[in-house]
Image (cartoon, grey):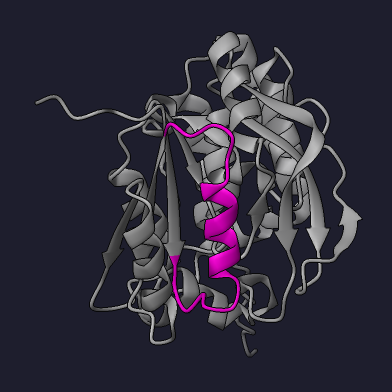
Amino acid sequence: MIQHRPKVSIGLPVYNGEQFLAEALSSLLAQTFTDFELIVSDNASDDRTEAICREYADTDCRIRYYRHDQNRGAAWNFNYVFGLATGEYFKWAAHDDICSSNFLERCVQVLNNDSSVVLCHSQTIFTKANGKKWWKGESVPNLDSWKPHERYEAVLSDFWCLAVFGLMRTEVLKKTSLIAPYYGSDRLLLTQLSLMGRFHEIPEPLFFRRCHSAQSSRLSAPERARWIDPRNAQKPKFMRYRGSLGYFQAIFKAPLSWQERVSCLNVLARYLLHSGTWQKFFIKIKPHEVSS
């Protein structure tokens, strides 16, 4: 018997998400596009996350729930759900965000009709913890450009990187580094995707990003490092270096013409100079004083 392969896979990694998880699951299960699987990976939560997931899984066969015996960090969990995906298209979902009921339908239409698009997302509304609309995110220009270096520059300039929660082509996403074990590696992933195809933004706010006190962006730098990968507590702090090196490597791994490659290198040089990251590549040694 041939098992049905869904058109879309949704991966939802979660750790202690009891406060908003039910609402997130409900918004996904209420999608007008129904041919999807929902892969939920529980990183050893010690709140009501497991009970909520099992309750929803019992009522909808599209949900595949996996629970782990230890918390291996957000990066591992994001990549774990993608590794289980079987759909032609893939979307990451957060346990605290909401999608409009037609989010998947609109994104699938775009990917079906335009092979040049590797990622489809929508405009974003930021909400408060109670779900009340707060403010509308600004669209990032040139993500849909036909010139790879313009898309590359657009991703580097994008503060929020919310396109990572859009709908992507699974086979293209497999060619990236996925989520690396350092905070901010979602930007590296998006730069890699931007060099392989265009992004398309649906000109309507179909994605609602919840802002609350427990989200990762509110953590201190050491806490964020442990959140993305608990092993970072014992590792040297090379986050900015690793990210910058990854941006450089992406240019040479992508199928670009030499003209585009040079243009991307110029973009990266301007970005590094503007951000001051070049200083991370050099160790300033104070000369020893020589006594007479």
- Give the x, y percent position of residue 157: 77, 43
Say which quarter of the image contains residue 45. bottom left
Residue 241, magenta (yes or no): no
Please give the name of the residue rendered at 47% of the width and 15% of the height, measured from the top-left corner: 255
Q: Which of 165 and 17 is in front in this view?
A: 17
Question: Which quarter of the figure is the N terminus placed in?
Answer: top left
Please state the extent of the stretch shown in magenta in the rendering: 14-35
Please give the name of the residue rendered at 52% of the width and 58% of the height, measured from the top-left corner: 25
Please identify the residue farthest to the front as the structure is shown: 59
Q: In the drawing, does residue 183 fall left or right of residue 173? A: right
- Give the x, y percent position of residue 148: 65, 19
Please identify the residue farthest to the bottom as the structure is shown: 291
Please give the name of the residue rendered at 75% of the width and 34% of the height, measured from the top-left corner: 154
Q: In this view, does 131 lie above or below 120?
A: below
Q: Nearer the viewer, residue 287 or 100?
A: 100
- Give the x, y percent position of residue 136: 88, 50
Q: Is residue 39 above or below residue 123?
A: below
Please give the name of the residue rendered at 70% of the width and 12% of the height, measured from the top-left corner: 146
Question: Which quarter of the figure is the C terminus placed in?
Answer: bottom right
Q: In the drawing, does residue 129 fall left or right of residue 176? A: right
